[in-house]
Amino acid sequence: MGTTDTPIRLKAVSSPDQPDVTPELEELYRGFEQELLVPLWTEIGDLMPAHPRSRAVPHLWTWQNLVRLADRAGHLVPVGRGGERRAIALANPSLGGRPFATPTLWAAIQYLMPGEDAPEHRHTQHAFRFIVEGSGVWTVVGGDAVPMKRGDFLPQAGWNWHAHHNATDEPMAWIDGLDIPFQYMNEAQFFEFGRDELPAEERTTPELSRSERLWGHPGLRPLGVQHGTAGSPLLAYKWEHTDRALAHQLDLEKQGYAGTVEPGHAAVRFSNPHDGSDVLPTIRAEFHRITGETAPIRETGSSVFQVFNGSGEVTVGDKTWSVTRGDLFVVPSWQPFSTRSEAGSTDSDSGALDLFRFSDSPVFEALGLHRTQLQTSEDA
Amino acid sequence: MGTTDTPIRLKAVSSPDQPDVTPELEELYRGFEQELLVPLWTEIGDLMPAHPRSRAVPHLWTWQNLVRLADRAGHLVPVGRGGERRAIALANPSLGGRPFATPTLWAAIQYLMPGEDAPEHRHTQHAFRFIVEGSGVWTVVGGDAVPMKRGDFLPQAGWNWHAHHNATDEPMAWIDGLDIPFQYMNEAQFFEFGRDELPAEERTTPELSRSERLWGHPGLRPLGVQHGTAGSPLLAYKWEHTDRALAHQLDLEKQGYAGTVEPGHAAVRFSNPHDGSDVLPTIRAEFHRITGETAPIRETGSSVFQVFNGSGEVTVGDKTWSVTRGDLFVVPSWQPFSTRSEAGSTDSDSGALDLFRFSDSPVFEALGLHRTQLQTSEDA
Amino acid sequence: MGTTDTPIRLKAVSSPDQPDVTPELEELYRGFEQELLVPLWTEIGDLMPAHPRSRAVPHLWTWQNLVRLADRAGHLVPVGRGGERRAIALANPSLGGRPFATPTLWAAIQYLMPGEDAPEHRHTQHAFRFIVEGSGVWTVVGGDAVPMKRGDFLPQAGWNWHAHHNATDEPMAWIDGLDIPFQYMNEAQFFEFGRDELPAEERTTPELSRSERLWGHPGLRPLGVQHGTAGSPLLAYKWEHTDRALAHQLDLEKQGYAGTVEPGHAAVRFSNPHDGSDVLPTIRAEFHRITGETAPIRETGSSVFQVFNGSGEVTVGDKTWSVTRGDLFVVPSWQPFSTRSEAGSTDSDSGALDLFRFSDSPVFEALGLHRTQLQTSEDA
Amino acid sequence: MGTTDTPIRLKAVSSPDQPDVTPELEELYRGFEQELLVPLWTEIGDLMPAHPRSRAVPHLWTWQNLVRLADRAGHLVPVGRGGERRAIALANPSLGGRPFATPTLWAAIQYLMPGEDAPEHRHTQHAFRFIVEGSGVWTVVGGDAVPMKRGDFLPQAGWNWHAHHNATDEPMAWIDGLDIPFQYMNEAQFFEFGRDELPAEERTTPELSRSERLWGHPGLRPLGVQHGTAGSPLLAYKWEHTDRALAHQLDLEKQGYAGTVEPGHAAVRFSNPHDGSDVLPTIRAEFHRITGETAPIRETGSSVFQVFNGSGEVTVGDKTWSVTRGDLFVVPSWQPFSTRSEAGSTDSDSGALDLFRFSDSPVFEALGLHRTQLQTSEDA
């Protein structure tokens, strides 16, 4: 009975919750291996834990290191067909060296040199860009040139054609978020190459994209355009609106009204103006402004945060870091997360810590798997 | 067999589609009357027509007349408990003298004298205010003081407490829209009196209501507040946003892009930022800017329009009127409607005709009864 | 100032909540009449009551009287084009002699003589049939012949072609329910004549319609057919299933388990197997089996009941009736309703009172206007 | 610069679509490794393919082998706390020896000896049981004892307490399907132990569960019970209904009417009677009856099939198998699937091939990632 051609390896173990190790059991296990079977009783602890135990670990990437290496790549790695993008992804240290920030989320720094273009393509993976510093690149989505500036959030639902072009003489870096690991694991991905070059009329550099002119007015729907596709038709959420919304919440709190999530903690969710849902079917994006300390919270599903402004201290599970502008960190599933802004930080007169966050929560909510727990002590 | 106590009166008629008039038929009809029965065969033409034949007729009310009489009422009619509001409703001439602009919609001018307050109450009727001129009144909704200015649209979903106070030394007029006739016909209405006077802290006159500070940012949801009730949580849609959105659509058209409803016709719908639905469960509200001529269209359900700016010509069914700022007119169910802006009108350098519109379309859409027909010739 | 051409008649009344009666006020009212305006302050008590005060009244129609007159009509009134149906509608005594059982609902007895056909037509009004006795008629919906037998419920969503044919040598009567008054008030109705005669292949008399063969299996959807239209794709809800479901609920109660609405009160709702919603967009249909007494309940919206089996006592508002098989009665909006089965009734060994009910609740629920109140004392 | 503590291993490769291999590039890659970064340009082909390329492969497990080994396990492996269940899972040969039938789905044979109980627990993983032969076991869900018999399908939405007990003196085997791999990958799982023994009143052996008595009537909702949780409230879909629904579809086809999916191919989906959705939030379950040949189809997402009756030939991607009662096989994402019933098979007089199927399609549909393609030639 040769078992050389099976990937299954079962080990009979002497343990109170395992069957007695006998020659008959060993023979049974060999039969399982041969027939490509695995019993639940040897696997249940790993597969069906009492609560999520993430394969990912909390980790911090500093912006300084990311930009340094991205700039280096700018000089060594051409952008164009094949590689498609000069994007460098965060690889969670416990996910086997794969370019996965968490089991479901991709987070990368993308870098475009002066005058460079990233060629047009489309894919089913849902994507967004978030800009922590710089400007000068336009993302062209279905012929609509969308400017990118510090603080702007640009969602891009799957299967839209898109290219980028750097219209300035400076390099520019930004963050890409996608559901690449989720779609990789679930095997849903399609990809197509687009035109090799954008026509002149799409290489414009307007201050306001067409999508913003149609959909960027609070509570107003354009009647002349249909919106049927998944994801938000609004292709840019400008920093000035986000900033103002957060400031208003803290003002309301100061005046004694409801508005913040918890004392000193303002937050907004980027939402689809068509139906109020998350901007992307698989990705939630939010902005948090913290002027004090947040209560530890844990959720099913994972998140990636980037510090947009200010400094502070962040605790995820058993890790604590000091963070500052541009730093990125991950919060694995069901790991408690809390943060504290650092008063008197130099680059933020308000002392606020501004955090951009994205997560896979829409997946969990759509499937009835979302749970949240405010945590007061170690009760895991 | 006396039929004096029955409201039924059946008349046997000699007609090809009616049963033969015989003594037996007359006896049958007397039996129906006695037993409170009415046969379909005498009623079907009225009840089940080939297409909607509205009991309402097209009609125009001029702003000048409305304001004149409202001002007169300001001096003669106190506002306060009992009457509750100094509101004067459009009464469609063919709806029996009832204060119904259409079979489902209430439209009224409301008038508040300097320093006056309209007392707090709440009702299940869904309501809004639209301001064609003036300012100085605040609507206080659940303690949130919302300013009213020319061009602003203020929805107010049913069962919210609300009062108005005029904080200036000028009278102010505006338009109220409600679903009073619809709820009257369907018998769904509840009403409650609130506090007789607003406390000082609710008599503030902020530039921006709390609701706008929370919900008035394009595509941004506040995370710290729940929204569960029917209708929009955004209590004011400011003119500057509406105006800009319409201007953008016409710009896009000029640049060769999609955006308008038809050539020269920009339009937005006021929508609930929570879920993208209509601002009110029973009332749709829109703003249209017309720079040429619109194609005749007819819809199930009825609308009321108010001219916000410019002048033009409006055709509804077999009626045609010249209209100017403030004028109100109704479009009954399935009556064709078209309009034409008047170039060179004096009060609008753009030559555009700006129309505010509200309708009962959400009722029809929710129940699968909505139909629209673009009309090219008289094919009714 | 002639007011002869206006339907408005305003009367200045001396009352604490009305403005002082002065010549100026009278002049203002003449102005309102002339300009087709009605003030809120003279109307608010009627239009915006503290709770719904139905224009309809509770009323009972006995089956014996209905059948007697319907049979008489069978001999005097031809069925066919023009009248379309030999249907005789309940006319609520306080709705002005109109054929409206309640402000929104139509209820009629329909009668077809041996061998007769009711011709094919379609309309946007949503309809159903319910059979309290007899059999032998088939309803042909889009070519699908659906049998009708005692206890069966047959929904027919708007805009489906349908005809009836009596395949036997006996006359047959049944109840039709439609939303005719609702669509009449809201002016949404379309109507079309169909073929004058059904082809032979549609005059079949199968035991089971095609719709039942596709959709009549609990929790099973056919994969090969699409269902996109409004209303249920299942065209018959057979008595055997309804009866069994009710019996099971009472059994569960006897065994100590949840299942009934209240002690001794089983109830099911006819639902759309496609999405679990009400069978018709504007009409809810239910079946209730009462073995004791029900607690008084009131709801916004109105209902019509038919006694299917047993006898009992029914109280609606301030009316109480003894009812028996076939009797029909209406419950106006917000009127408390309760019932009691009559033990030892002759035609029902179980002593249960079986009630078929239909209502306009889906309209109220879709628009956020539905309210229910269990009533323990007279607290209206 | 030691890279010993990083899991990243990047290899500069000489290739037209890769950057030139230079010492600088090597240094950059070492920097990436050190900082836990992975570039897109080395990974894009694997992560973002033109269409899904499943890590899983088509594979067939024969029922004979499964039952033989399960029975062996029945004699060697105790059931009870710790292992919880005597379940033996299909392990796709190319998924690294993990007990995953596909990247998202778990499929196992469960085996219970005479008189045995599997203890009570609950978990967020959504589950079902399908019975290809035998009877005698009751699944007790929240105190409701549900019988299991050949052909029955029993869904069990996550977080419901459940236990099994074999009330007979025969062993019984059945198939379990769960979303264990999906929840493992996405890290959403919770698990709790229940009572060690069921009380006597839950060890009953009724013919019909309480859930069936409440929810098992076509198109009828019980009014007295709420249903708010995810997944179907109907805990058993009995074979007699499934069989009849499939037979009806083939009858309709024979009579010239719509009803089947394609000629000779009847199919039903098990659906939630509360809202018509899939029985489980993450798992779709269907039954197919094939009397000829099916057209090759491919879908995003993966499926597991079990042959319930008859024999035939199945083709998945480049594999073709003869299959017979009880055999299980998997269809990976985007692999074309077709089948052919074997006329004159001995155990099925009808010559039909009956297939039970479950898949992860609800996940893909909820997230806008579902695609289907009918395939006429090899156009992958």
Image (cartoon, coloured by chain):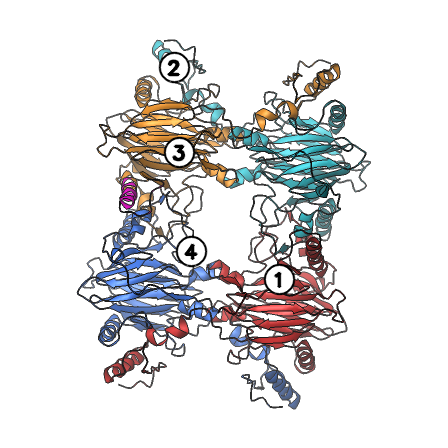
Chain colours: A blue, B orange, C cyan, D red
- Stretch in magenta: B243-261
Instruction: Classify 10 Å Cα crowding around label 4: few (below 14), some (14-19), many (20 and above).
Output: some
Marks 2,3: beta carbons within 8 A: no
Q: Name the residue under label 3.
A: B358
Marks 4,3: beta carbons within 8 A: no
Q: Marks 1 and 2, Cα distance to the nearest angstrom?
A: 69 Å
Q: Marks 1 and 3, Cα distance to the nearest angstrom?
A: 47 Å
| Quarter holding residue D69 | bottom right
Amino acid of disc 1: Glu
| Residue B226 seen in the figure | yes
In the picture, the quarter occupied by the N terminus of chain A is bottom right
Q: Marks 4 and 3, Cα distance to the nearest angstrom?
A: 29 Å
D2 to B83, vertically: above or below: below
Between A113 and B239, the residue placed more toward the observer is: A113
Q: Name the residue under label 4.
A: A230
Q: Name the residue under label 2.
A: C34
Instruction: Classify 10 Å Cα crowding around label 2: few (below 14), some (14-19), many (20 and above).
Output: some
- Pointer 4 chain: A
**What x and y, as percent, mark residue D303?**
57, 68
Q: Mark 1 points at which residue?
A: D286
Amino acid of disc 2: Gln
| Quarter holding residue A143 | bottom left
Report the label total: 4
